[in-house]
Amino acid sequence: MTNPFTGLSAFPLTPLRDDRVDERAFIGLLDRLVGAGVDSITALGSTGSYAYLDPDERARVAHLAAEHAGATPVFVGVGDLRTSRILKHIDAAQDAGAAGLLLAPMTYQPLMVNDVVELFRTVIEHTELPVIVYDNPGTTHFTFTTELYARIAELPGIASIKIPGIPGEPSEVAKRVASIREVIPKHVSIGISGDAYGAAGLIGGCDAWYTAVGGTIPGPMVKITRAVQQGRAADALAESERLAPLWELFAEFGGSLRVTAAIAEFLGLVGARSLPLPIQGLDAAQRARVAEVVDELQLDVP
Amino acid sequence: MTNPFTGLSAFPLTPLRDDRVDERAFIGLLDRLVGAGVDSITALGSTGSYAYLDPDERARVAHLAAEHAGATPVFVGVGDLRTSRILKHIDAAQDAGAAGLLLAPMTYQPLMVNDVVELFRTVIEHTELPVIVYDNPGTTHFTFTTELYARIAELPGIASIKIPGIPGEPSEVAKRVASIREVIPKHVSIGISGDAYGAAGLIGGCDAWYTAVGGTIPGPMVKITRAVQQGRAADALAESERLAPLWELFAEFGGSLRVTAAIAEFLGLVGARSLPLPIQGLDAAQRARVAEVVDELQLDVP
């Protein structure tokens, strides 16, 4: 059986409408992902706005994801600022039928290394579900060292590490991935994030790609992933290169979330203003640029 | 009548015991503050762990603060990641009898300037209560510019700006405070934070000191504040200088919260492990250092 923590894991948005989860639109996104043949779906990732949603909303989203994903494994983001709430999110994800959990060490007060180790220890003692360690310093402001990856990955129940994108030449990417691989158990997969770095990360030896925009536009990301898996690295890089205008929007407009939401809104997959306030989303001029790129790259095909 | 957003505002901890608010210990802290004659109490500031508490817990803490503060005005922190929850916290603070609100732009996804302006606009349209703008980049990772202070301070209902500590010579501090004063309306007070910078900030022209450790050890902070108000700047600086070993602990042990909680725990004002997990608090060796400093500086007198 294939390790479920490999291949392409797509992170759908959790669209809001009038400050409530737009369940119909969310189900539509799930259907797209299943249809595109992604290897797993991670609900309530950063792209799924987990940090902004109430416990009840998160439980409901986890249920919907598991219900509509069919045979596709569903992982559920359970991060929160407080440990006791994380444990409640875990129970809800388990009830929903999640195949795994995604946990980022959210911060308000900066966390110490020991706080994070004890957090993961508490979590793996609480659940039988496999856990993805979520290293996303751009949102959590906590920075993992390779040594800390090793300390946490040796805990039983850790299944994967979601690492930030690695800029640089292919040889540097491979070197970085190998340096992590060297210190973690064999059964723990390494997944790349930062969509612009997905192709290079997979080619460089990552087992998985945790994709944000692929939760809305799965087609090109599936294509890239399959190309790498079939040994066609050049094809994967060519497709990623073709998407360069999209990666440029991420860099220019403050990350993937606002751009991904604008794409979904432009394509009518979700309603207008689908992000949780206070996040306003892109302005009119930025949205016009997004629309141009969607047309130019033909992103309207799932 | 004195502007309530001036003088010393003390930020009590919200101590937990077994992951629940320790109401008795919290009331004890309030009593100390009233007894010490602070000018206001800000409940649910960063030091009050607002970011970690559930809406019900926050409403209860706001009620307790207003109930036990007597004639001392109580301000309540209402920050949250989602605007709709902020509005609910505001309603609860208003019900409790708060005299003002403290609002920091919490982030998970980085916020844009426009997000923050619209957030404050939404809040002041929702409430009649005066609002303190809370600029705390160490926890929110949002950086205000002086220009943004000006844009937000011109909104009706903004009463004060809580600025981060200003390192440097007294002349530089005064210059920085004057540069803010120049662009904000006269009725908006400027309050310094970062306890090591409190005395210098007040001497440099700040109207208020929003003190973290002064929510547990109010005595020395009241002394410093009164000295500045009575024109005895040298006395204020001497007292702040006397507390240098305490400021050094803040710098060395990752900020004021963990040290303040350790002081309160050492003095028996709150139970052991009073911070919300995953924050473990100081380790045994660090706690021993804290105990030494408490004894050396005679911080056991309120």
Image (cartoon, coloured by chain):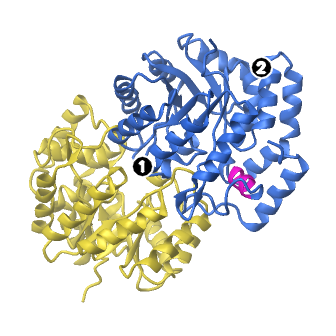
Chain colours: A blue, B yellow
Residue placed most toward the observer, A98 or A282: A98
On whether residue A264 falls in the magenta region, the answer is yes
Image coordinates for residue B37, horizontal then vertical, percent = 14, 71
Residue placed most toward the observer, B48 or A48: A48
Report helix, strand or loop for mark 1: helix
Q: Chain of mark 1?
A: A
The answer to which image quadrant residue B58 occupies is bottom left
Residue placed most toward the observer, A179 or A274: A274
Contact check, label 1 and label 2, Cβ < 8 Å:
no
Report the residue marked by disc 2. Answer: A171
- Amino acid type, mark 1: Asp
Of the numbered discs in the image, which one, if any, rests on residue A56? 1
Residue B287 shows in the view:
yes
The answer to which image quadrant residue B76 occupies is bottom left
- Amino acid type, mark 2: Ser
Q: CA distance from mark 1 to mark 2?
A: 45 Å
As drawn, is B72 to the left or to the right of A282?
A: left
Q: Residue at x 24, y 70 (%)?
A: B225
Q: Which secondary structure type mostly characterizes the magenta part of the structure? A: helix
Q: Is residue A271 above or below residue A88?
A: below
Image coordinates for residue B24, horizontal then vertical, percent = 11, 54
In this rendering, which labeled residue sits more in front, label 1 or label 2?
A: 1
Report helix, strand or loop for mark 2: helix
Image coordinates for residue B200, horizontal then vertical, percent = 35, 65
As drawn, is B40 to the left or to the right of A118?
A: left
